[in-house]
């Protein structure tokens, strides 16, 4: 089961258009804080992929997680439904939900 999940995560990492995300982040000067200091900069492709991979793994326990524009969701196998992951990069979002 764990190997299957890792394979699904790696498939998303391979197929997701991180280059397009980097173009958007660069155009918007969307910066993340570096983990080893307080310097802010637009992340590299490697850092984008590492964050996405981390969030996808975290979503197994949390179902939905997000950071830095990414949102990762895990959909567990229920009855005949297929187990799968989702990865999004969100620039803008609105909903009418009122709790």
Image: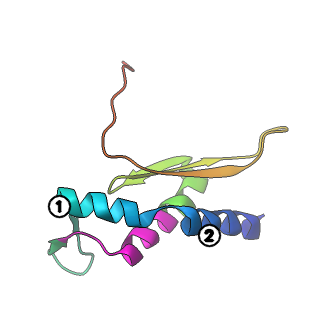
- Name of the residue lying farthest toward the bottom: 36
Between 34 and 19, which is closer to the camera in this rendering?
Answer: 19
Q: Residue at x 45, y 70 (%)?
A: 49
- Against 93, residue 40 (above or below) is below
- Name of the residue lying farthest toward the left: 39
Q: Residue at x 57, y 64 (%)?
A: 15
Between 19 and 52, which is closer to the camera in this rendering?
Answer: 19
Q: Residues within 10 Å of mark 1 (few under 14, many from 20)?
A: few
Mark 1 highlights which residue?
Answer: 29
- Where in the figure is residue 37, as x and y percent of width and height? 18, 79
- Write down the region rendered in magenta: 41-54
Q: Residue at x 31, y 46 (%)?
A: 91
- Secondary structure under badge 2? helix
Q: Residue at x 52, y 61 (%)?
A: 16
Residue 47 belongs to magenta span: yes
Report the Cα–Cα distance between label 2 and label 1: 28 Å
- Where in the figure is residue 90, as x and y percent of width and height? 37, 46
Checking the image for residue 15, the label placed there is none
- Against 21, residue 82 (above or below) is above
**Mark 2 or 1, closer to the camera:** 1
Mark 2 highlights which residue?
Answer: 10
């Amino acid at each position: 089961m764990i190997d299957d999940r890792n394979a699904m995560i790696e498939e998303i990492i391979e197929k997701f258009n991180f280059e397009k995300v980097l173009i958007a982040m660069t155009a918007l000067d969307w910066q993340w804080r570096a983990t080893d200091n307080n310097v802010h900069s637009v992340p590299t492709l490697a850092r984008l992929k590492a964050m996405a991979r981390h969030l996808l793994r975290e979503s197994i326990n949390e179902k939905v997680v997000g950071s830095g524009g990414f949102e990762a969701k895990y959909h567990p196998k229920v009855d005949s439904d297929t187990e799968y992951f989702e990865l999004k990069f969100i620039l803008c979002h609105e909903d009418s939900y009122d709790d």
